[in-house]
Image: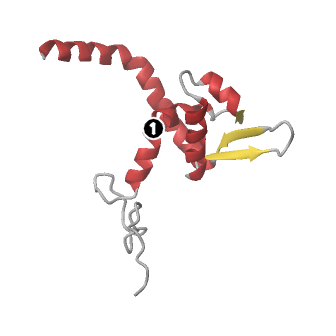
Amino acid sequence: MGIEKPPSTTPAPVAGEADAPADVWSAGCPSRRVLELVANKWALLVIPLLRGKPQRNNELLRRVGGISQKMLTQTLRELELNGLVLRDDRQTVPPHVEYRLSALGLSLSKTLLAVDRWAESNHAEIDRAQKVARARF
């Protein structure tokens, strides 16, 4: 009798899944993983910042208010792992590492920049709606 492998935490791809049309409302659709990735608060802020020119870690840390070094590193790694960000390590002393968007990340940044601008334009209305809703409860 062979050794049994523990169950995987990542769902196995379904046969023909790549050929099936994406449907974000379907629980098993792989596009849900993409939504989870880009719905991250820090990803929503980092991706549009990389739209212009490549930036170093400390530049991003200064520009994204409230993010910790640990969270920035985790976010950049996750974005790199998923093909949205490219990491350029110049292999120098002192270390010189820059991050930039891949073509895929650039295509996403346009949409996220619009979401960021929408949030800036509508935060006051959202705050008012919350106050009204809280007053009812």
Question: Toward the viewer: 87 or 113?
Answer: 87
Q: Is residue 92 left or right of residue 103?
A: right
Q: Is residue 71 left or right of residue 101?
A: left
Corner quadrant of residue 13: bottom left
Image location (x, y in percent) of residue 42: 51, 33
Corner quadrant of residue 89: top right
What residue sits 64% from the left and 22% below the top? Answer: 62
Colour option used? secondary structure
Direction bottom: furthest residue: 1
What residue sits 44% from the left and 50% below the top? Answer: 34
In the picture, which quadrant includes the C terminus?
top left
**What amino acid is at disc 1?**
Asn
Query: On the image, numbered disc 1 is attached to which residue?
Result: 40
Q: Considering the numbered disc 1 on the image, is that residue within a helix, a strand or a loop?
A: loop
Corner quadrant of residue 67: top right
Q: Say if residue 59 shows up in the picture.
A: yes
What residue sits 40% from the left and 54% below the top? Answer: 31
In the picture, which quadrant includes the N terminus?
bottom left
Question: Toward the viewer: 60 or 92?
Answer: 92
Q: Say if residue 53 shows up in the picture.
A: no
Q: Is residue 34 left or right of residue 86?
A: left
Direction left: furthest residue: 136
Image location (x, y in percent) of residue 130: 25, 17
Q: Is residue 92 left or right of residue 136?
A: right
What residue sits 41% from the left and 61% below the top? Answer: 10
For label 1, the crowd category at 10 Å Cα-Cα, with few meaning under 14, some 14 to 19 and many 20 or more, is few
Image location (x, y in percent) of residue 39: 42, 39
